[in-house]
Amino acid sequence: MGEDNKDKHPYDDIIYLQHHVSDNRVHMSIHDRAAQFSPFAALTGFDGAIKETARLTDKRIELDEAAKTILDEKLGIVQEQLSRQQEVEIVFFRPDERKAGGAYISRKGTVKKIEGYERVVLMQDGTRIQIEEIIDITGEMFQTEEDSFSLE
């Protein structure tokens, strides 16, 4: 009789039975079952805070008086040429809302209006650019005067 117990496994009586299906509970999807075993995030938002801290921003470039004069002259030419609707490219600084610094953005398009009182350039696509944030303006309308507008 001792020999029979060595060959017999403890689950031999149930190994070939069908899987039990509950009459009271709905079968749980694989996705929901997996969610039970997902890791617990004790520090909610911590990953976002780390990513925000690691995100790089640019420092604002302060233009000297000569560069500001050139930009004023270019804005004057853009103002005179508004009716021709020529495309220009404006490079400007956009301050970051969350931390010190910001990003330099280049926007191509046609200028719709220059609002002198609000100190804003309004583009055809609705973009509003603060004149104080502009560091460069380029376009075909400056090709003849390009040598005189060199920032270098």
Image (cartoon, rainbow, N blue to C red):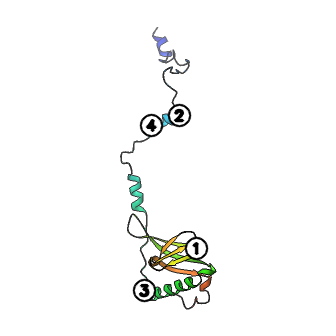
**Residue type pointed to by label 3:** Asp
Please report the residue visible at 53 percent of the width from the left and 85 percent of the height from the top. Answer: 74
Q: Earlier in the sequence, mark 3 or mark 1?
A: 3
Name the front one of labels 4 and 1. 1
Question: Which mark is drawn over residue 64?
Answer: 3
Is 101 left or right of 137, judged from the image as shown?
left
Q: Earlier in the sequence, mark 3 or mark 2?
A: 2
Question: Which mark is drawn over residue 30?
Answer: 2
CA distance separating discs 4 and 3: 60 Å
Can you say whether 79 is above or below 31 in the image? below
Question: Which mark is drawn over residue 108?
Answer: 1
**Residue type pointed to by label 2:** Ile
x%, y% of residue 117?
Answer: 45, 79
Is 107 left or right of 103, judged from the image as shown?
right
User: For mark 2, does the 10 Å Cα neighbourhood hold few (<14), some (14 to 19), or many (20 or more) residues?
Assistant: few
Task: Indicate the secondary structure of the residue bearing disc 2.
Answer: helix
CA distance separating discs 3 and 1: 24 Å
Name the residue at the left extreme: 42
**Residue type pointed to by label 4:** Phe
The residue indicated by pointer 4 is: 37
CA distance separating discs 4 and 2: 11 Å
CA distance separating discs 4 and 1: 50 Å
Task: Indicate the secondary structure of the residue bearing disc 1.
Answer: strand
